[in-house]
Amino acid sequence: MATDHFSAAGKSLNKRLAEKGLRATSQRQHVYEVLLSQRDHPSAEEVFMRAKQSKPEISMATVYNSLDALVKCGVVRQVNVDRGATLFCSNMSEHVHFSCDDCGKVFDISLKDSPQVPEVDVPSEFQVRKIDIALHGRCTGQCDDCGRKETIA
């Protein structure tokens, strides 16, 4: 079943890459599959370590270039939380990111489940292309690390 999902994603990926004038390569497909395989927000280094498990010949430069292409064609987004490493998110549905101040994990929160987004008066000479919202707090009950801290405290 996962193979069917990746095949469908691959066809969509190939089309999106072509629309941006980028070549579809097995390395880009592999990096994309690595991102789709887990619902987390890995750094480029984490993607590299995961990709290397099943494709030992892949290089860090190839992972960086593949991530750049995936972001350019709109199937992956970059997530920048605080001043840490850039993270990557394969969830392209409308959502915001919640960053836990204790464990550092990043979670996707559907916009319908998120707190009210404040209205912003954007000057007419600015054209908004996208909105990135990061919520910060504690993920009590959402992960083992923070759940343990809650019961110990």
Image (cartoon, rainbow, N blue to C red):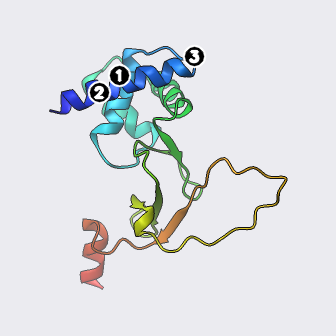
- Residues under numbered marks 1 and 2 in contact, where contact means CB atoms less than 8 Å apart: yes
Does residue 119 appear left or right of residue 51 in this picture?
right
In the rendered image of this protein, does residue 69 appear above or below residue 145?
above
Say which residue label 1 marks: 11
Q: Quadrant of residue 140?
A: bottom left
Label 3 – label 1 distance at C-alpha: 15 Å
Residue in the picture at 54% in, 21% down: 19
Residue in the picture at 40% in, 45% down: 42
Say which residue label 2 marks: 8
The amino acid type, in three-letter code, at marker 2 is Ala
Does residue 135 appear left or right of residue 11 in this picture?
right
Q: Residues within 10 Å of mark 1 (few under 14, many from 20)?
A: few
Residue 125 % position (x, y): 85, 53
Which residue occupies the foreground of this view, 56 or 89? 89
Does residue 12 appear left or right of residue 72 in this picture?
left
Label 3 – label 2 distance at C-alpha: 20 Å
The amino acid type, in three-letter code, at marker 1 is Lys
Say which residue label 3 marks: 21
Res. 108 in view: yes
Element assignment for label 1: helix
The amino acid type, in three-letter code, at marker 3 is Gly
Which residue occupies the foreground of this view, 85 or 69? 69
